[in-house]
Amino acid sequence: MIVVVDERELVKNGYTSLFGREGIPSTGFDPAEFTEWVNTAADGDLHAVEAFLIGQGDCMLELPRTIRDRSQAPVIAVSDQPSLDATLALFDSGVDDVVRKPVHPREILARAAAIRRRLKAIANHTDVGQIRVFSDGRDPEIAGETFPLPRRERRILEYLVANRGRRVSKTQIFNAIYGIFDEEVEENVVESHISKLRKKLRKKLGTDPIDSKRFLGYCIDWN
């Protein structure tokens, strides 16, 4: 999920709409609402955030350090001012990157992925047995062959691999895939997506790498 922070309602709605067209859940806050939310949100909700996108507001230079107290997700500033001083002030405030408007949501996602790779000092892919998932939106591979998946199933697989070795709940998966503020989709849809994903993996691999336990959640591993 992408969190957009801007005092302008039109800007917030514009970005959330653009991310929605790319299949990426997002939500918008004005700066005051966001400060309260980020200080009180549950750890699981913050873990679902892939990046913070901050724009215009009176306290924007204070937000990056507020975010960093609770989350390691990339913080990207969108600047309306073609000014070196303004850009340097944003970097001094603690943002990970600064982009100038107009900027396509895919570029924001690519920059966020690049920041996460640098922070984790890992390649742009992760392997679990014969499965390889990518951090740049590509379909996964199995035994070196592309394994096409619908967007939701791909993102679930990416989330499970990112959390390899520990169980994640249906709620955590839902929050990561649909966003913590999506009230139009039932949480049980996750079970349908996972069922379809498991059937495809079982057919390709001859075994099911996703383990599920009632009340405990899901995990992926390969022995």
Image (tube, rainbow, N blue to C red):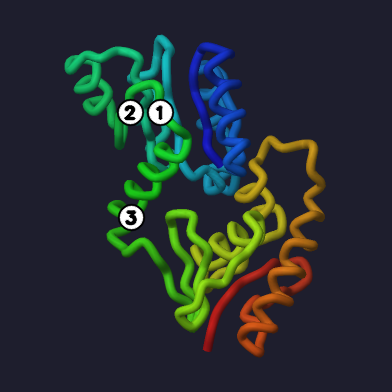
Mark before the other along the chain sequence, 2 or 3: 2
Residue assigned mark 3: 117
Camera-side mark, 1 or 2 = 1
Tell me whether circle 3 and circle 1 mark residues in contact (CB < 8 Å): no
Q: What residue type is labelled 1?
A: Val
Q: Secondary structure beneath disc 1?
A: loop
Identify the element where label 3 is drawn. helix
In the visual, does 161 lie left or right of 187? left
Q: Can residue 20 be seen in this view?
A: yes
Query: Which residue lies under the disc numbered 1?
Result: 103
Identify which amino acid the numbered label 2 is placed on.
Answer: Val
> Do callouts 2 and 3 mark residues in contact (Cβ within 8 Å)?
no
Between disc 3 and disc 1, whose residue precedes? 1
Q: In this rendering, would 219 be left or right of 216?
A: left
Residue 157 versus residue 34 in the image, above or below: below
What residue would you read off at disc 2? 99
What's the distance in space between the residues labelled 2 and 3, CA to CA? 18 Å
Residue at x 62%, y 80% (from the top left corner): 209
